């Protein structure tokens, strides 16, 4: 009987998180909301010294420059030299991108009257409005009191002092906060 014996030393392993490494910025008026990386952790096998200094593994850089919609990328992992093995060399990254939403206060929005019968006169207690609006930053940037329409509809209004709502016409995706 003969025995072949080997001296086998098992290397330790460590589970480390996978971190996103991005380059660039989304298009003006857009932002990164969140991202998901699969796998989110990988198992690395190596020496005790190597693993002691290893806190995470990054993806190779993913460009989000000029992005206006979600990105899905299969990307290599940037694994530092010195490992024995890893459970994965690639990751799938989903980056959620959406328009920035901001608030803007606009003053001096003139209020008009519409549908006033010719033989009557009308006067308003307030001649203009100040509104705080919320919407996509790219839309709010172009808004001013000059391009917002506000009016009071006097159709079928009786004589006397009457409180009526002011109608405001805004671009799609913009709402009045106050």
Image (cartoon, helix red, strand yellow):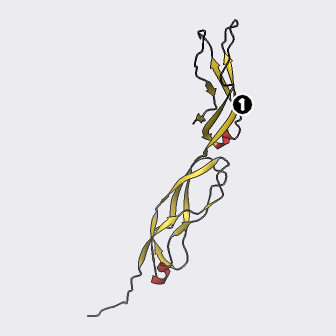
Is 121 on the left-hand or right-hand side of 70? Answer: right
Is 12 on the left-hand or right-hand side of 53? Answer: left
Q: Quadrant of the C terminus?
A: top right
Callout 1 secondary element: helix
Q: Quadrant of residue 15?
A: bottom left
In the picture as drawn, the residue positioned furthest to the left comes out as: 1
Seen at 67% across and 51% down, the residue is 66
In the picture as drawn, the residue positioned furthest to the top comes out as: 119
Q: Quadrant of residue 170?
A: top right
Q: Quadrant of the N terminus?
A: bottom left
In the picture as drawn, the residue positioned furthest to the bottom comes out as: 1
Pinpoint residue 63: horizontal percent, then vertical percent. 63, 58
Disc 1 packing (10 Å; few <14; some 14–19; many ≥20): few
Q: Is residue 26 above or below residue 4?
A: above
Q: Nearer the viewer, residue 128 or 82?
A: 128
Pinpoint residue 82: horizontal percent, then vertical percent. 52, 80
Q: Nearer the viewer, residue 20 or 120?
A: 120
Q: Is residue 111 above or below residue 39?
A: above
Q: Quadrant of residue 123?
A: top right
Pinpoint residue 89: horizontal percent, then vertical percent. 51, 67
Pinpoint residue 129: horizontal percent, then vertical percent. 66, 30
Seen at 69% across and 35% down, the residue is 107
- Residue bearing mark 1: 147
């Amino acid at each position: 009987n003969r025995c072949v014996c080997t001296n086998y030393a098992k290397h330790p392993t460590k589970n480390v998180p996978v971190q996103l490494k991005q380059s660039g910025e989304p298009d003006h008026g857009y932002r990164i909301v969140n991202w998901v990386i699969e796998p989110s952790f990988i198992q690395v096998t190596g020496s005790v010294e190597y693993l002691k200094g290893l806190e995470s593994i990054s993806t190779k850089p993913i460009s989000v420059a000029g992005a206006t919609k979600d990105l899905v990328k299969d990307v290599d992992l940037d694994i530092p030299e010195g490992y024995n093995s890893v459970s994965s060399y690639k990751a799938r990254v989903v980056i959620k991108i959406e328009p920035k939403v901001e608030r803007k206060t606009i003053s001096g929005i003139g209020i008009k009257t519409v549908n006033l019968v010719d033989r009557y006169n009308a006067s308003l207690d307030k001649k203009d409005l100040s509104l705080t609006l919320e919407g996509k930053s790219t839309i709010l940037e172009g808004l001013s009191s000059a391009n917002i329409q506000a009016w009071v509809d006097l159709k079928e209004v009786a004589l006397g002092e009457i409180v009526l709502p002011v109608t405001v016409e805004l671009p799609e995706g913009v709402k009045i906060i106050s």
